[in-house]
Amino acid sequence: DVKLALSSSQVAQDPLVVAMEAAAKRIMERSNGEIEVTVYPSSQLGSDNDVLEQIRNGAAIAVLVDAGRLAPFKKELGILSAPYLVDDYKQYKGITSAPIYQEWVDDLAETSGIRLLNYNWFQGTREMFTKEPVTKPEDLDGVRVRTIDAPGWIATVNALGATAVGLPWSEVYSALQLGAIDGAEAQLTGAFGIKLHEVTKNLAFTDHVQLLTGLATSESWFKGLTEDQQQIITEELTKAGDEASDATVAKLETVLADMKAAGVTVNEINVDDFKARVGGVYEELGLVEAREALQPYIDAAK
Amino acid sequence: MWKIFDRAEEIIAIIFLTGTVTSVFFGALGRAVGHPLPSGPEMAQLLLIWTCMFGADLIMKRGEHIRISALPDSLPPAGRKALHLLCIACMIPFLAYCGWLSWHLAMSNWAREIGASGLSYGWVTLALPVGCALMIISLLRRLFGHGLLYSIEPETHDQEQLL
Amino acid sequence: MTSFLLLCLALGFMVVGMPVAFSIGIASIVYFLLPGTFMPDSTAVQRIIAASQSFPLLAVPLFILVGHLMNGSGITPRLLTLATTLAGWMRGGLAQTSLLLSALMGGISGSAVADAAMQSRVLGPPMIKEGYSRGFTGALLSIGGLITATIPPSLGLILYGFLGEVSIGRLFIAGIVPGVLLTIALMLATAWVSRKRDYKPINDRLPTGREVLSAVRRSFWAILFPVWLVVGIRFGIFTPSEAGAFAVAYAVFVGVVIYRELSWADIVDAMLLSVRDIGMIMLIILFSGAFGYVITFERVPQTLAELTIGIFSSQTMLLITLSLFLLAFGMLVEATVIVMLLTPILVPVITAAGIDPVHFGLIMMTLVTFGGMTPPVGVSMFTVCGILKCSYKEYTVEMIPLAVAVLAVVMIMILFPDVVKFLPRAMMG
Ligand code: NA
Ligand code: NA
């Protein structure tokens, strides 16, 4: 009998978790009850980094993480959450089918014991939520914007012109409400989940990062499965990723409407003005070569 | 010799606490004036676990860890000794195992970063094996220096507690 | 089932006198050693470490340090003068003064036991000399600490907020009204006892406006402290988790620069005492990290929530039942331990029943902290009776009117939730 725990930082109602639950059921059925999958939403098993550490020690868990979490183990993978890498999240299909990407994933498994099963869980595009309206990059001067506490994200937000603040996600609402920060960058669904629309009334579609995530599990545990079991798990979880992405996209429309109804103003911006500012981020993170290597596949996917 | 060791431990613990307070303070102050120190909260949390482990050992040395003493107190010294022996027989292997596991965890995950500062999370993890080792030493010193009867409780029952 | 057995194991260790932190730690590592657990053992130590890596938790060591700095900074005697001026004219003047002092200290200190211990040393001997019975003196000074623990800042509420993922800022603001109600209720009970026993006032007349003004001026910086704390949190100068660091800086500033009483040696002393307290309380929190993981992994809160929702039809009935349980448990077990063990389990249960976790937090912390003031096991009781040399029996008899006052306030909080919920809603939306 095989047991697998799926961990996500999202809440139980999130489309991603819903898709995980569905996959858990299908895996159970396809394996005739041999593989038992339990889903743990809301970081119940620990923060993403903690779960990754457990995974490296051989725990039978798969965690949904963005590539920034994997970058310390395999620098090149960090590019997957770099700013303005693609125009549309569907172009990631081109990236994940590139041989160079497969090399990075195998390298990661070999050196760190983390097996990246897929990278097709779209959570939304990162946008800028602020107290004051933002219509051009200059408006971000001196604005304290919360971002993910990792080098890539901080570099991106600073490059856009804001002042990056790496606060825990759980503190964002009260920090905004109390004025400890002036804005936050987030995807719409995530922002709606913590009621960001109650404390920030301006939204700019900066689209700086297409937030894709993937399921990472323990290489040693995964190798210990039979080929059949590996296939069932890989196929069903990748399928779940596509379902989750579709559900997320479908939800974006309603979420945006709800936010507008709650009094959020969407400010017109020219994305290219913001895009022009982030070139240096790739150099800062040492990802220039990786970007060049991926470019043909991204172009082909357009 | 032990005197120097004990004094040094107190001084280090105080330095850790001072560092925790100043990191939080300047982290918040920096953000309030628009120049956040991205590593402020991270330093604070790193120093916090070190403060905790050293503080826990200082308390261990005094035999003052919070415990419910109603049952042992109602027993004659021989009974109390027996219960204390049972406790210590569980505590030392527990500390040793925790220390070993966390040492292994720190060493095998050195690549994990604390956050934006790029510092290894191993520095956080390392506090536990160090703390466990210190507490094993202190427990043994109490056992041999104060005897089984006062190994995990102080000679006088007048300590104050929180909440 | 497994988690129930582990809970029994932890309680068993506690009963035989093992330090609480280790009882919890050993019981949780046993879970990982069981053959049925498919998580690696290193997950246990990882959870222990992860428990320390929480930003809100930083408030605990910071406010412990603030409490210790108070003693050397000259803030305490100034607040005592103010309390004496304001309450000395009442029947049972010294007793009423002590309650008012608890309320004033409440704005700075977050610990009931620290307040009770300080007051037993400062006010205990004069009260006994004035003819107050030892039992009543002990009970009053001990239970007065409950006011200090309820008025923000509050260590108990910080722990509850941290473990239950409830906004500490809201909990703090929600504590103001119950803290004031407790002060009033205890003062009424004290007035009744004083009339019956003919405990005398210490001043023969009401204070003049000039006297009040002068006392307020002398303690101005100390009174300003809680105001400044709430304003600072409300206007985003710092988050509730960071407030403690500013409180430390303020206490040092007032003690060194304004009152000029806090010496270098005092600061070092306060830090050493704090490091010890932090080690004592945080080791329990850290080792509980592994225990919390076991509870989550075994889905205990979900199961419990599903069970209770079927049984209780009304929120009030659920609250009353839980309160009786917490009161009984609190009388027997140390407050920190109960908060550690029960917050992660109970918060999901009451949230599922539609109860505001801020509301429940105030009820739970009041009862659990009060448990430390009652026999048979109570840290506040032990501390105060130890300092005043009063018998537990006398203490128990004399505490009855005060206990009635506390329970009446809890009943008000249960029956009229708005008493607790109004202020945070008005201030924070
Ligand atoms: Na208080
Ligand atoms: Na009690």
Image (spheres, coloured by chain):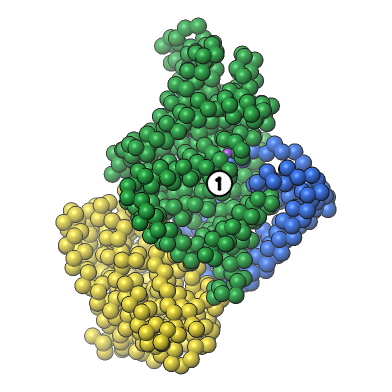
Q: Is residue C257 above or below residue B28?
A: above
Q: Which residue is mark 1?
A: C336
Q: Quadrant of the C terminus of chain B?
A: top right
Please state which amino acid type lies under the numbered disc 1. Answer: Thr
- The percent position of residue A236, horizontal first and vertical second, equals 35, 84
Which residue is outermost to the front? C311
Q: Is residue C402 above or below residue C66?
A: above
Q: Is residue A100 above or below residue B144?
A: below
- C99 with respect to C388 (left or right): left
What residue sits 33% from the left and 36% below the top? C416
- A220 with respect to C352 (left or right): right
What residue sits 44% from the left and 9% below the top? C206
Nearer to me, C299 or A142: C299
Give chain C's shade: green
Chain to which mark 1 belongs: C
Give chain A's shade: yellow
Nearer to me, A55 or A133: A55
- The percent position of residue A175, horizontal first and vertical second, equals 36, 50
What residue sits 41% from the left and 11% below the top? C209
Q: Which image quadrant is residue C179 in?
A: top left
Callout 1: SS: helix
The answer to whether residue A108 is seen in the rendering is: no
Nearer to me, A112 or A151: A112
Nearer to me, A90 or C4: C4
What residue sits 33% from the left and 39% below the top? C417
Which residue is outermost to the top? C204
Quadrant observed for ligand 2 in the rendered image: top right
Q: Residues within 10 Å of mark 1 (few under 14, many from 20)?
A: many
- The chain displayed blue equals B
- C353 with respect to C69 (left or right): left
Q: Is residue C96 above or below residue C360?
A: above
The answer to whether residue C344 is seen in the rendering is: yes
